[in-house]
Image (cartoon, rainbow, N blue to C red):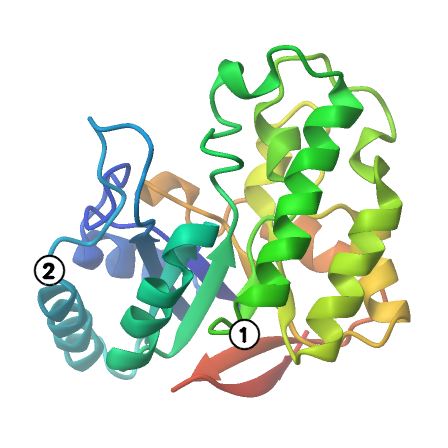
């Protein structure tokens, strides 16, 4: 069964599809299970943007309605993608624990008050320095925050770096990457294979094959796959290649979640 565990609807400020549009498209594409993971990114540094679901109860109710409507055609899970920042970890934990989520992605979108999506993050830094700062922040945050199931799109800086991609740069700062993977494993957390990376000139998911393989070698067992789709045409994007890499890395299953409990799905 094909599952897509990273979808953003219009409940995310950058989402361009309704929850029902996403469900209909997933069915049309032959996807058997999806998880909506709209953004909860507290204290976003740009005052003109709010990366928070404005009404979480309404969000959950609408997903529940679609679950009833498409029962027997599509399995629909209620998830969120939380953005980790040091000053909002307690507040983020409260949100995660006060709502009946099936699945939680934790991601790093803001590093020292800057979003690597924007060029200002890279100003005055070498490519390696921009990667290292991101990985150091990620490692610090996953040591402090545990209310999540998988770490989202590890290697986020690669997707937006203004510097030309060079072969092998996804393995920059591999010492820190290994520490991140070990910490996740020790804490019973997983990684997602985010196939939006296939849109980048590097033509590989986030994280890349060698990192997924190393996660497996270190004893990692929890792995999800997600398109990070914000519009209907991207649901399931890159899954054939992504699933092949997961298999090549030594996995024979991916993970689904129900009420934060894991289940293995053979691939």
Tell me the distance, in whole angstroms, between the alpha carbons under discs 1 and 2: 31 Å
The 10 Å Cα crowd at callout 1, few under 14, some 14 to 19, many 20 or more, is few
Q: Is residue 173 above or below residue 215?
A: above
Q: Which residue is mark 2?
A: 55
Pick the quarter of the image with the N terminus.
bottom right
Q: Position of residue 86 (x, y in %)?
A: 47, 52
Residue 70: image location, x then y, percent:
22, 75
Give the quadrant of residue 251.
bottom right
- Which numbered marker is on residue 84? none
Residue, x 60% and y 11% (percent of image)? 123
- In the image shown, does 229 or 117 lie closer to the viewer? 117
Q: Nearer the viewer, mark 1 or mark 2?
A: 2
Is residue 122 shown above or below 39?
A: above
Instruction: Give the labeled residue for mark 1.
Output: 1
Please name the residue shown 31% across and 54% down the image: 40
Identity of the residue drawn at 69% across and 12% down: 163
Residue 21: image location, x then y, percent: 21, 52
- Residue 151 found in image quarter: bottom right
Q: Residue at 62%, 21% (x, y): give it.
A: 161
Nearest the eye: 217 or 144: 144
Could you tell which of marks 1 and 2 lies nearer the N-terminus? 1
Q: Is 240 placed left or right of 128 in the picture?
A: left
Q: x and y percent of residue 117 in the render?
A: 48, 26
Residue 127 drawn above or below residue 249: above
């Amino acid at each position: 069964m094909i599952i897509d565990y990273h979808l953003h609807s219009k409940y995310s400020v950058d989402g361009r599809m309704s929850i029902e549009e996403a469900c209909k498209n997933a069915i049309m594409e032959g996807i058997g299970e999806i998880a909506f993971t709209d953004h909860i990114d507290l204290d976003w540094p740009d005052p003109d943007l709010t990366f928070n679901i404005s009404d979480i109860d309404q969000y959950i109710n609408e997903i529940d309605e679609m679950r009833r409507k498409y029962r027997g055609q599509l399995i629909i899970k209620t998830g969120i993608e939380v953005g980790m920042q040091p000053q909002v970890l307690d507040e983020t934990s409260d949100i995660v624990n006060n709502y009946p989520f099936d699945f939680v992605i934790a991601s790093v979108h803001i590093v020292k008050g800057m979003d690597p999506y924007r060029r200002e993050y890279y100003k005055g830094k070498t490519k390696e320095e921009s990667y290292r700062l991101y990985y150091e922040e990620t490692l610090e945050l996953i040591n402090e925050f545990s209310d999540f199931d998988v770490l989202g799109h590890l290697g986020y800086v690669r997707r937006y770096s203004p510097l030309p991609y060079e072969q092998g740069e996804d393995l920059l700062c591999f010492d820190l990457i290994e520490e991140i993977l070990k910490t996740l494993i020790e804490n019973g957390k997983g990684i997602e294979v985010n196939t939006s990376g296939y849109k980048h000139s590097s033509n590989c998911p986030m994280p890349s094959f060698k990192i997924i393989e190393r996660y497996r070698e270190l004893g990692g067992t929890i792995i999800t796959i997600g398109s990070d789709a914000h519009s209907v045409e991207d649901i399931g994007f890159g899954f054939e290649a992504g699933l092949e890499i997961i298999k090549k890395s030594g996995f024979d299953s991916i993970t689904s979640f129900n009420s934060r409990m894991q289940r293995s799905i053979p691939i």
